[in-house]
Amino acid sequence: MLHRIQTFIRQTPGLNIPGHTLRAAGALLKPLMPRSLYGRFVLIIVTPILLIQIVSTWLYMERYSQQVTQRLSAGIAGEIAFIIAETEKFGGKDQAELFRLAETHKNLTIRIEQDATIPTYQPTVFFKFIPAIMSQQLEAQIRRPLWFDLEKRPSIVEIQVQLDGAVMFVELRRSQIIATNWHNFLVWMVIATALFLTIAILFLRNQVRAILRLGLAAENFGKGRDVPDFKPAGAREVRSAAKAVIEMRDRVNAHVMQRTEMLAGVSHDLRTPITRMKLQLAMLGDTPDIEDMKADLVEMEFMLQEYLDFARGQASEDTALTNVSDVLNEIKASASVRGREIQVDAPGTLEVPLRRTAFKRCITNLVNNACNFGTQVTVTATRDDSGINIAVEDNGPGIPPDRREEAFRPFHRLDEGRNLDNGGSGLGLAIARDVARAHGGDIELGQSDLGGLKAVVSLPG
């Protein structure tokens, strides 16, 4: 069947449009197409309906006007032909009485002007078929040269018939010879079309609302925000997609919880022997070897805590409206206590839904890295149309462009230049990016104006 249709299209000149022409037309129409799903649904439904209604209305009105005008013109032509015959037969006083009766009973205003001729031109009208039908009916029955005007006066039609040495002027109402009540049909057609389109648009809006709610729920899930009131709704396919999103969210949450519980158990089991070793070392006194062993245990505890933080992520924290400036100032104060001075530039009303503790851990990791390799560190927070951006910059050695993505790999340390997470576990940037992406954002590394590294945290909100 499809092959037959393709063959028919190729063999039909009007339908066999070249592919490059279709592509060019598509490129021209693409900027005019609506971007939203609702707009495209409405366009798909409304455009064919309007085209069908316009074409059908035009065809109906043309046929209706043709038939009615043909019948009215035939009737008026017969009346005029009869009056001409009677005028030529009797004349004089009987002619005036005949004209009076025609005006009284037929609404025809008739007069005769001697030594006159009809015009040689024919006024143009919008509907070309109307004068053609009138001319056909009038000439068929009157059988004399004639001329008529449909445009000079809106409600009056003037007909001039050439007689022997004179012209008969006939004036009549437009409704007597032309179909003039077509607008009633047009009004009802417009009302019916508007009603149908309103119902269709409301139905489409209800269907699209379910898709928009699904998209919003999926977006919130991706940002780590819970949507407790979300329920599958809409058509069967939309409900199926919504159930799949909910099941995916539950599986992801279950996986995160299992990973967190496993790492928490491992952390607890390892901390017990580490604590015993610290107590044993404390009882051995203070010697250089003992101090080195104590430092190793401290580093082991730090690494173990970072492993747990990386595994735990943000599973146990709820999202709440957070003032970013307050968090950055807390990080600044904490760094100042440790002897590290940083500059913070952030508006005081910069609020966004965040998991506060996880967000603070993300920025703290970036600030610690900057402080480890630079003497000047700045933190700048701004808001734009897409959300908020927090830039952490330093004047350290930086990272080569081809190694910046490599720096985000868990447990990975750079071998040259700037060795991030120096002395740590290699999870600082991995944890920071994990937190940013769990909020629906990301972290990008670049070149700072200070000469070192610039880490930009982009979050929606």
Image (spheres, rainbow, N blue to C red):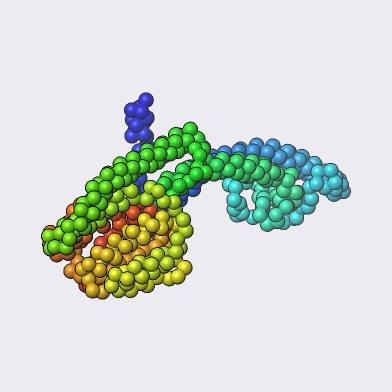
* Depth check, front residue: 219 or 364: 364
Quick check: 153 above or below 80?
below
Q: Position of residue 254 (x, y in %)?
A: 37, 39
| The C terminus, quarter of image | bottom left
Q: Relative to the observer, which residue lies in front, 281 or 233? A: 281
The quadrant in which residue 264 appears is: top left
Q: Position of residue 85 (x, y in %)?
A: 76, 41
Q: Residue at x 72, y 48 (%)?
A: 174
Q: Residue at x 41, y 55 (%)?
A: 355
Q: Is residue 138 visible?
A: no
For the point 82% across and 47% down, the residue is: 103
State the image coordinates of residue 436 (x, y, percent, origin top left).
34, 55
Q: Nearer the viewer, residue 176 or 114?
A: 176
In-image side of 441 versus 408 (left or right): right
Front residue of 292 and 213: 292
User: Above or below — where is 388 with respect to 219?
Assistant: below
Can residue 75 be seen by looking at this rendering?
Answer: yes
Report the number of discs.
Answer: 0
- On screen, residue 203 versus residue 17, left or right, reads right
Instruction: Give how far across and how far down residue 4 sits, in percent.
Output: 35, 27
Most distant residue in the top direction = 1
Left or right for 125, reference 20: right
Quarter in which the N terminus is drawn:
top left
Residue 456 drawn above or below residue 29:
below
Seen at 51% across and 37% down, the residue is: 234
- Horizontal relation, residue 74 to residue 194: left or right: right
